[in-house]
Amino acid sequence: MKKVLIYGFPQNQAVFLTPTVNFLFGNCRIFFAGTTDELKNSPEQFDSICINASLHFWQLDFAISLAKKNVKEHILGLSQVSVSQKNLELLFQHGIRHILINLKHQDELIHCKKAIETNTSYHSKGSIILKNKNYESNSDIYNKLSDKQKSAFHYMMSGKSLKEFRTDFGFKALSTASTHWNLVLKKYQVHSVIQLRNKY
């Protein structure tokens, strides 16, 4: 039986999504994770992961990076509400082949299910229109951060400490972790994590 993870939704929404996930992937064992720690430390490898496409863009980026390490087949960007342009851009940058942002229309669910079964791409109608726009995000500072800097950014925005960042990513010296941490602050032209959070 396939194992599918629903990630990033509040518990009540995740439970509500269970019938949708069963429809898309067939009879499967469904797991829930609400935080990146749960995703990162999960002993399971999942056949598919359904990620909340409406998370803050920095949470979505970090979650997809972790999900790629824990998934065998599909990552599905899923949302019950509209998704920001920045998030859609991230989904496309990460090569997410299945994006379903409209759960109200049965035809959307049917087309997405067929795409999963035939291993072809499916993007909800609204996301296809946005995908085809010549949308430039090169000026976005976040996109210019290295992978380690994006991780540091995520830790800052999640209220985690520099020491946790060092430990979780296995830096031998605190100064190495501090370098990535401080480069993020410098690129955003702020002097503290509080100032960085105030930008968002």
Image (cartoon, grey):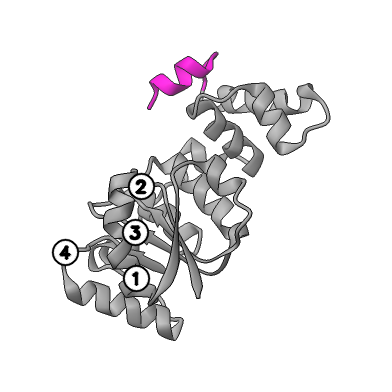
Position of 194 with respect to 107 (left or right) is right
Q: Amino acid at mark 4?
A: Lys
- Nearer the observer: mark 4 or 2; the answer is 2
| Residue farthest along the bottom direction in this orientation | 118
Q: Quadrant of residue 144?
A: top right
Give the distance between the C-alpha atoms of the residues marked 1 and 2, in whole angstroms: 16 Å
What is the magenta range? 189-200
Q: Earlier in the sequence, mark 1 or mark 3?
A: 1
The disc label shown at residue 78, or none: 3
Give percent across and percent down for residue 188: 51, 25
Give the percent coordinates (x, y) of residue 41: 62, 46
Q: Is residue 188 magenta?
A: no
Q: Nearer the viewer, mark 4 or mark 1?
A: 1
Residue drawn 47% across the image and 46% down it: 138
Nearer the N terminus, badge 1 or badge 2? Answer: 2
Can you see residue 132? no
Residue position for label 1: 22
Marks 1 and 3: which is nearer the front? 1
As measured in the structure, the alpha-carbon distance from the residue carrying label 1 to the one carrying label 3 is 14 Å
| Position in image of residue 15 (x %, y %) | 31, 54
User: Identity of the amino acid at label 2?
Assistant: Phe
**Upstream in the sequence, badge 4 or badge 1?**
1
Residue at the spot of label 2: 9
Check disc 2 and report its element: helix, strand or loop.
loop
Badge 3 amino acid: Leu
Q: Could you tell me which residue is drawn at 53 percent across and 34 percent down? A: 154
